[in-house]
Amino acid sequence: MTLRAGKLPADVLAGLLARLPRRDPRVLVGPGVGRDAAVLDLGDRLLVAKSDPVTFAADDIGWYAVHVNANDVACMGARPAWFLATALLPAGAPETLPGVIFDQLVAACDALGVELIGGHTEVTHVDHAIVAGTMIGEASPDELIRGEHIRPGDRVLLTKGIAIEGTALLARESAALLRERGVPEAVIARARGMLFDPGISVVRDAQTIAAAARPRLLHDPTEGGVATALEEMAQAAGATLVVDPAAIPLLPETRIICAALALDPLGLLASGALLAIVAPGDFERIAAGLADVTITCQAIGQVERGRPRVILDGVEPATPLASFSRDELARFYETQPDDTGDRATTAEGPR
C-alpha cells in the first residue's frame, strides 16, 4: 500500500506511537491521536509545545504557520509565547521570497504577542514553499485543559463556522477555476478575506471560553475538517458524540465554493473554528462571553455513554457522521490538471 497526501492514517500513527518509550515523568501529556500539543511539567509552570507544517498554502504561508500552531497551544489552556520556523524554499524562487515569508511570520507573531525566537531556512528540492513551525506556550497547572471529567449530557459547541481555512485557500489558489464554475467575483473576494476575517486563529475563542467557564475539552479542527476533528474528540473523550449536522454553521462563501467544486465542507481544512465540550450549565455563560467579543457559537451536539464515535442526532439506527480518510483539499488537488488553478509560490503578496 502506498501513502496518499494528507494525514497519516490514525491506526498507522497509533501503532507508531505505541512503540515510544516513556522515560521522563515530567511529560504530562505526550503524543497521541487527537491530542493537540505536548505538556511538560516545569514545577510552578507548564510548558506546552506544538509542531505543525503548512504544506497546502503558497503565499501568506508565514501567517498560516504561526496561527495553526498557536491554535493548538491555546486549546490546551496555554498562552502562545515563542515560535520557531523552518522554511523550505524551492530552487529558482524569487530572491524576495524569504523576506516576504519573514514579514508574514513577524506580522502574525505581533498579532498574537508571540516572540519569534529562531528556526532554519534553506533552498531545497520542493516545488513550493513549506513552513514547519513550533509554537511554545506556558500555563499554570490549574489552567491546563486536557479532556478530563467529560460526562454524558455535556454540550458540544462550535465557534464561527466550518472550513474557513479551506474556503480561503481555494479562493486564493483556484480563483480561475471558480470563475469558470460561475462563482461571482464578489464571493471569491470575500472568501479570500476569510483568512483574516473571521480569520484562522482560535486563540481568542479559546481564551474567552476559558475565562467564562472551565471547558472539559477544546480542539482545533484542521486537516480532514470538522468531521475528522469530531472523531478525534470522541477518541480523546472516550465517549460517543451525538451531533446534529443541521446545527453545524456554514458560511455562505463556503457553501457556494464547495458546491462549485463538488467538495464536502465537513471534510475541508477547518482552522478558524473551535470545538469545545462544556458542562451543560456553562453553555449560556460561554455563549454570552463569546458574543461580547463578537465571536459566534452554536451548540451542535452532546456527549453520550458509548464507545468513541460520532453519530447523527435523531437518526435510527445510529448512523455515523461522514468520515474522511484525507482532507477534501488534498483530494481536490489530486484531481486537477497541472495547469489548472493558480497554485504557485509567489512573492508578490496575497493570492
Image (cartoon, rainbow, N blue to C red):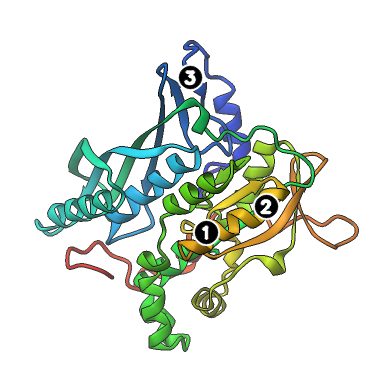
**Which residue is painted at 56% across and 76% down in the image?**
255
**Which residue is painted at 41% across and 19% down in the image?**
44
* Residue at which label 3 appears: 27
Left or right: 9 in relation to 138: right
Q: CA distance from mark 1 to mark 2?
A: 15 Å
Q: Nearer the viewer, mark 2 or mark 3?
A: 2
Instruction: Locate residue 82, reporting x and y percent.
Output: 29, 36
- Of 13 and 225, which appears nearest the observer? 225
Residue 37 can be seen in this image: yes
**Which residue is painted at 36% across and 40% down in the image?**
80
Q: Amino acid at mark 1?
A: Leu
**Which residue is painted at 49% across and 62% down in the image?**
292
Q: CA distance from mark 2 to mark 3?
A: 28 Å
Q: Residue furthest left?
A: 95
Secondary structure beneath dot 3 equals strand
**Number of numbered discs:** 3
Q: Nearer the viewer, mark 1 or mark 3?
A: 1
Secondary structure beneath dot 2 equals strand
Of mark 1 and mark 3, the one earlier in the sequence is 3
Instruction: Locate residue 32, reporting x and y percent.
Output: 56, 31
Of mark 2 and mark 3, the one earlier in the sequence is 3
Q: Is residue 75 above or below residue 273?
A: above
In the rendered image, which quarter is residue 161 located in?
A: bottom right
* Residue at which label 1 appears: 290
* Residue at which label 2 appears: 156
Q: Amino acid at mark 3?
A: Val
